[in-house]
Every structure is written in C-alpha cells, then in structure tokens.
Image (spheres, rainbow, N blue to C red):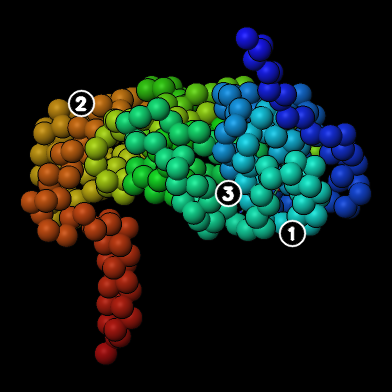
Amino acid sequence: MAAPRKIALFRLPPLPTIGEVIKLYNLRAEKQLSQNFLLDMRLTDKIVRQAGSLRDAHVCEVGPGPGGLTRSILNAGAADLLVVEKDNRFIPGLNLLSEAAPGKLRVVHGDILTYRMDRGFPKVITKAWEDDPPDLHIIGNLPFSVSTPLIIKWLENISNRTGAFVYGRTRLTLTFQKEVAERLTASTASRQRSRLSIMAQYLCTVKSCFTIPGRAFIPKPEVDVGVVHFTPLAQPQIKQPFKLVEKVVRNVFQFRRKHCRKGIEMLFPETQRLELAEVMMHEADVDPTLRPTELSIPDIRALADAYSRLCSENQGLLTYDFREELRLKHLNRRSGSSTQQPV
Ligand code: SAM
C-alpha cells in the first residue's frame, strides 16, 4: 500500500519585511486611526496561536495595516482570509501580499463598524449554535479608538446571532488597551470589575492570553496591550434581550462605590422609585448593600429577570430613562423662571 502523502503546509514566498513595506509605500502611522504597528513576527505568530488551529480555516482580520498579523495568519494555514482595512494607503501592500498567496487573501477597503460580516463567508461553514464553533475566526490588532464600541457591537451580535455569528459561535482573538483587557476578564469583586466584564462574560468564555509591552509597537502607544480570546457560550448566562441587560448593568454601575440598590432605583420614575426598587431587589433576592463590583453574573441574571417582569406589568417602564426625566425637569424649571418676569 502506498504511504500517505504528506500535505505540505503553505508558506509565503520570500517577501520584503514589514519594515521595508512601510518604507516602500511611505506608510506613516496616522494618529486619528490609532495606528500602532507590530513588526515582530514572533509576536504576531504568538497572537495567532491564541486562536487555536487555523489549518484550512476562514478568518476575518480587522485592520491589517501593513500586514504583519496577516502574514502570520496565512502562515498558520488559513484557507480563506478576508481583511477589512479603512485606510486606503495600505491596500496596494495588501494586494501584493494577496498575489503571494493566490486564492487565499481577500482585501476589502472598508470600515469594520459597517462591514456586513454575515455576507462575507460561504453559508456552508455554518454550524448550529449549540454545536462546536464554526471554522471561522475573527482576529485583530484593533485600533484603540474603535475597540470598545466594536466589542459591544459584536457582543450584541452574539446575543442576536447576527453579523459574524450567523455562522455559529465564531471565536474572536483581539487586542485591547491593557486596562480594557483587564476589565473584560475581571472576576466578581475584583478592582477592574465593570459593565464590560458583565456584558462580555454573560455571553462568552473570556480568556486573557498575554500582555504585549507598548514598546513592541511602532509608534509606541502610551499603554501596554492585552490579547483576549472570546468563545461565545452555547447557553448565554442571562436569557433576556441584550438591550435590557445593558440597561440594568449600566444603571447598576453608575454609582460604582455605592450600594447596588442606589443604581437600581434609577431604573424607575421618581414617583415609584423606592417602591419598585424594593420589589425588584426582593424578587431577585439580591443583597441591596452589595457594591456593583461584588455582583456575580447569577445576581445580574436575577436582577434582569425581575426587571423584565416589572416591565411587562408596567407599560412604558422599559423605555424610561431617568436622565430624560431630569432633563425635562431642568427645562421646565428654566422655562418657568424665564416666564416669571417681575411685574
Ligand atoms: N494589524 C496591523 C498591525 O498589527 O501592525 C495594524 C494595527 S493598527 C493598531 C490598527 C489598524 O486598523 C490600522 O491599519 C487602521 O488603519 C485600521 N483601522 C482603523 N479603524 C478601522 C476601521 N473602522 N475599520 C477597519 N480598519 C480600521
């Protein structure tokens, strides 16, 4: 019997270094686009390894810039890499890379905040939500300026199974400012516990991978950078709509150092505030004297469930915003004082 043939791993042909590409195309980093480049291939390889095996995988890379991470993804054996880059100065260099990896690299000049990821990949890769994750990964050395809005948007997509998550539980390997990475992975009662910790962890297994010192980037950012890996959970820990959970969590965390009851009260109009907050805390069976940072995900789940029940019994409660009530009060006071002219 013939010995099984070894399948050769794809390797990119010799190319100019990323430093040479930057010089060749005169790619000065633009501050407004939070451009900090990684030139060290050992580091880009290390980021890519956090995603797991990319052999024959589909990958979307966010903000490829001069293409260091892009090369590592291709060398890891990805079969189909779609890169989305906003700055057109990088497109010629990326097209050159695409020629060196025929049929493997698709270059999109666009904005990741609006790019329709649900149309970017073949439907056949789709897996049922409860099944293993699909062979699709999102990887990016994210621009700091968009990293927080982007992860919130993707978390909402996970909750609604839209965007990149129409294919199933697509995994993400992303960089953040170290402080944001710490908030994403912070456990109950830790100093960094925040709104972002709850929103990420009720929907995903979130793993902090490693820290990259700021000096590894060109130009050097003010801060160090954390690499974080997300796998969407087959069963989210809270089963309420994303916007409802977000509203409860936002209110709870607005008085970070006070008892959690204080933030909960602000979910209700002034006239019913004390009474309905009492009902909500009682139904959820959560200690009202806990600080927001001390609340576990099951506590937040109980609070979100209790709030949802109250919303179904009290019309208009879900859309109530105490800031709007305050604003109207302020306006009324001002118009009242301006019309009360002395006679
Ligand atoms: N991946 C490269 C690396 O590791 O060297 C570049 C990283 S740099 C921190 C961020 C990249 O994202 C830049 O190339 C920037 O032009 C791009 N970018 C910024 N905002 C973007 C957006 N909204 N959509 C797509 N790309 C964006």
Mark 1: C-beta under 8 Å from nearest atom of ligand 1: no
Spot occupied by residue 97 in the image (x, y as percentages of width and height): 78, 44
Disc number lying in front (3 or 1): 1
In the rendered view, tell whether residue 104 sits above or below residue 119.
above
Q: Amino acid at mark 3?
A: Val
Q: Amino acid at mark 1?
A: Asn
Looking at the rendered image, the quarter that the N terminus falls into is top right
- Please report whichever mark, 2 or 3, sits nearer to the chain's N-terminal start: 3
Identify residue for label 3: 146
Pointer 1: residues within 10 angstroms few (<14), some, or many (20+)? few
- Please report whichever mark, 1 or 2, sits nearer to the chain's N-terminal start: 1
**For the residues bearing labels 2 and 3, Cβ distance under 8 angstroms:** no
Disc number lying in front (2 or 3): 3
Identify residue for label 2: 287
Please identify the residue farthest to the front as the structure is shown: 1
Please identify the residue farthest to the bottom as the structure is shown: 343
**Residue 250 in view of the camera:** no
Spot occupied by residue 216 in the image (x, y as percentages of width and height): 77, 30
Inter-mark Cα distance, 1 to 2: 53 Å
**In the depicted view, which residue is nearer to us: 102 or 342?**
102
Q: Amino acid at mark 2?
A: Asp
Spot occupied by residue 263 in the image (x, y as percentages of width and height): 28, 41
Quadrant of residue 283 in the image?
top left
Identify residue for label 1: 88
